[in-house]
Image: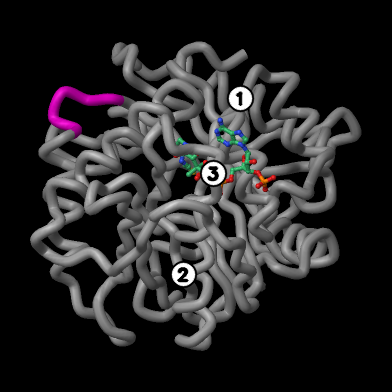
Amino acid sequence: MTTAQELMDVQSARLATLDEALPSSYLLPHRGEPLMARLADGTEVAGLMAHTSHPPGSLQRLWSATENYELFPLLGEHPRAGMDALLDSWRRQLSQREITAADSSAVVTWPSRDVDATRALLDHGFAPLTCLAVRPAAPAKYTKLSGTVKTRRAGTDDLDAVVELALAELNYAALVGGSVLRGDAETLKRNAARVRLHTTGRTGSEPVWLAERDGEPIGLAECGWTDTETHPGQHRLASGRWGYVNCLSVREQERGTGIGSLLTALAHDEFARAGVVGSYLYYNPANPLSSVFWPRQGYRPLWTVWEMRPATALR
Ligand SMILES: CC(C)(COP(=O)(O)OP(=O)(O)OC[C@H]1O[C@@H](n2cnc3c(N)ncnc32)[C@H](O)[C@@H]1OP(=O)(O)O)[C@@H](O)C(=O)NCCC(=O)NCCS
């Protein structure tokens, strides 16, 4: 019998050869329901399923379904057949539970470059709703803007402008990815932005910039810092301190004129000065703007978040 540890070791070694930017180990949640599956030749694969509920009022509801069922696969060296067999087994496991919520999701977050597993996820009907993308720390490239656009760090007095631009991004993202426009979205965004504008981290305040034309806010870059040692929730990055782009938003009528690139350059410069390993962000592959914009800014997919909504639709 193959042990979970053996599957984990073989899987970790295989993933390390696929993508050197992945963290050295694949972390399982502390609690979950174990899952087993057998391939046609008797080979075993395994997984752990974690169930999380996001009650009304929690920020995660802006990008997650209320009831989340997440699978953490241990596929050894069988990414395609192993993922296929495990998803069959997961479907049977989920069908025995009373999942009534239409607002539910089955989620698998998997290394983007493991395309054999991608085939199995697509065959089971999963959609690649989100990518965690990374960029090595490097100096920014600036393009000169025409006109009268000015940029500056946002402060606590800019809360209304930050919330308005963040909500515009959420509106757009809810059309092209996993984000959800909840009724309390404005309150949730306001509370999160207030914290970010007030937070003082190791490297100074969380960096947030506004772009303005004639004093009118037209663009927002809301960024932060993630240290993998003090932020164990972010276990999908190689260890070290990272810059994080939480939200980039440019007013619709101002897009395509270089404002997003300028704000991103400011963020990349600040990240580089702070000596980060690199920077990361989440974007939706079906977003026709950001899926082009971020790779041009030097980002590439590291993990893909595959989702099935509702979870009962798993096939
Ligand atoms: C993604 C976004 C922030 C980029 O900001 P922007 O100011 O439009 O970006 P830029 O003008 O610097 O660059 C956009 C690129 O698309 C091109 N483009 C052309 N017309 C465009 C248009 N109407 N809208 C957007 N981009 C356009 C630009 O030419 C540019 O390409 P380039 O590298 O050849 O210069 C902005 O489009 C936006 O707010 N989108 C909606 C929210 C969103 O998706 N946010 C990102 C979430 S991850």
Give whichever of discs 3 and 1 has the lower sequence position: 1
Q: Residue furthest front?
A: 147
Q: Ligand 1 within 8 A of label 3's CB?
A: yes
Q: Indicate whether residue 184 is drawn in magenta.
A: yes
x and y, in percent, of residue 294 in the image: 61, 50
- The residue lying at 16 percent from left, 41 percent from top is 188
x and y, in percent, of residue 163 in the image: 20, 44
Report the mark closest to the observer, 3 or 2: 3
Label of residue 69 in the image:
none
Q: Which residue is mark 3?
A: 257
- The residue lying at 17 percent from left, 66 percent from top is 155
Give whichever of discs 3 and 2 has the lower sequence position: 3
Q: What amino acid type should be assigned to the residue bearing mark 3? A: Thr
Q: Nearer the viewer, residue 255 or 226?
A: 255
Label of residue 266 in the image:
2
Quick check: can you spot residue 27? no
Report the mark closest to the observer, 2 or 1: 2
Label of residue 127 in the image:
1
- Residue 300 in which image quadrant: bottom right
Secondary structure character of the magenta stretch overall: loop
Q: What amino acid type should be assigned to the residue bearing mark 1? A: Ala
Q: Is residue 246 left or right of residue 16?
A: left
Q: Is residue 207 left or right of residue 193?
A: right
Q: CA distance from mark 2 to mark 1?
A: 33 Å
Quadrant in which the C terminus appears: top right
x and y, in percent, of residue 82 in the image: 77, 37
Q: Indicate whether residue 158 is drawn in magenta.
A: no
- Label 3, secondary structure: give it: loop
Q: What amino acid type should be assigned to the residue bearing mark 2? A: Leu
Label 1 packing within 10 angstroms: few (<14), some (14-19), many (20+):
some
Q: CA distance from mark 3 to mark 2?
A: 16 Å
Magenta-colored span:
181-185
